[in-house]
Image (spheres, grey):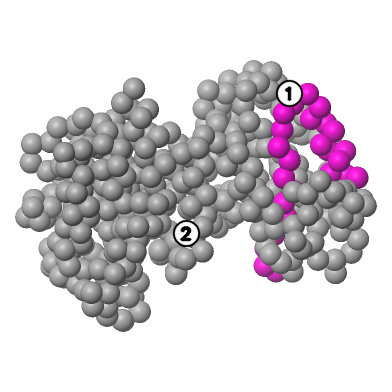
Amino acid sequence: MWKKIYSTVFTPRLDDEELSKRLEVVKSAMPTPIFWLLGKTQSGKTSIIKALTGDSRAQIGNGMHACTKTAFIYDFPDSQDCIMRFLDTRGLGEVDYEPDCDIEAFREQAHVLIVVMKAMDHSQHAVMEAVRLVHKAKPGWPVIVAQTALHEGYPDSAFEHLSPYPFDTEDWADRVPENLSRSLLKQRSLFKGIDAQFVAVDFTLPEDGYQPVNYGLEAFWRSLETALPHGIAIILHDMKEIRKELHDVYSKAAHPHIVAYALTSGVAGAVPIPFVDIPIVTLVQVKMFQTIASIYNYKLDRQSWAEISSSLGISLLINLGRRELIKLIPVYGSAVSSVLTAATTYALGKTLTVYFQNLHSGKALSSEAFRAIYAEQFEQGRSMLKDYVNEIQQKVLK
């Protein structure tokens, strides 16, 4: 089996046109949550993307690409392995902006409309005009109103964020500074007739002096989980939790790619794609290995591949995952086995990032340690991905 993988890694077949077409069949079955951010310039849209993805402002700026005259798309982590997409409309509040073109482009794509307003900004006529047009075109769309930059309504610069977070309680208006309370209520009154969720947030930079820097992020996640289909909400929520455990900038960059490949391998089990010699799941895993090695600036050749395989005991790790699948025969190919395939891919990816992390730091772990890491990440992946993969598989098999 590994001779076949070697030949796949070091020959161009992995990227040939036929493989790309077949992988697209799999990926087309995987819904990507799309968030349409609607708000004035400097209202905090970029900060929301940064808080949800963990990406830096520079990366977001470089990753945006135009899709209409006044709108941009940001794929996270990139267009190839996209697991979240943000649509950012520019120009609201500026002279001669017409939202009709953006509405036409986005109304069949987005899952959630996120309206972004600075908490103390009362000049929202253009924003509300666009919101009403969107709501009229798609009345069933979930609407989340993010009220940002709360600190601008604080009595003075020494005032700190209220703890615990008060805005998800019934009496929040009595617990926050009067001017801020009045402004937030005034903005919320603009949405009369629109079923919207409101969430107050303050996403700042460390040098701004407010702690935590992502104030209200948990509440924002809860609003997304309420608005999105169940499977998508679960995967997003667990990605947020796992980010707390990431060790360096490389593993942080690799994580969303690992999730994307894990989902692709899991969904592949539900899409009948015949391969005579090498299973498509193996191809997906090898492509993931290449991606992770590239993120760590590691040259992947025959010698280095042999070293990695030997250090990690990759054959053994693969067999650990397959042992779980064997238990399921004759129901292999069911929703359960698809989840385990995804979990195997996830665990392999996470174990590989630990290998590269230790390579950078000059440390050496034993094969036994890597097996323990793999087993832990296998369970983590199975727990995180099961609802998403099962829901997508049901969709594919309909």
**Which residue is identified by label 1?**
132
Quarter of the image where one finds residue 353: bottom left
Quarter of the image where one finds residue 337: top left
Residue at (13, 67) in percent of width and height: 306
Which stretch appears magenta?
182-207
Amino acid type indicated by mark 1: Arg
**Helix, strand or loop at disc 1?**
helix
Q: Residues within 10 Å of mark 1 (few under 14, many from 20)?
A: some
Residue at (8, 36) in percent of width and height: 276
386 left or right, relative to 125: left
Q: Is residue 347 above or below residue 33?
A: below
User: Which quarter of the rendered picture does the C terminus lie within?
Assistant: top left
Residue at (55, 40) in percent of width and height: 86
Q: Position of residue 220 (x, y in %)?
A: 65, 48
Q: Position of residue 284 (x, y in %)?
A: 24, 46
Name the one closer to the observer, 245 or 358: 245
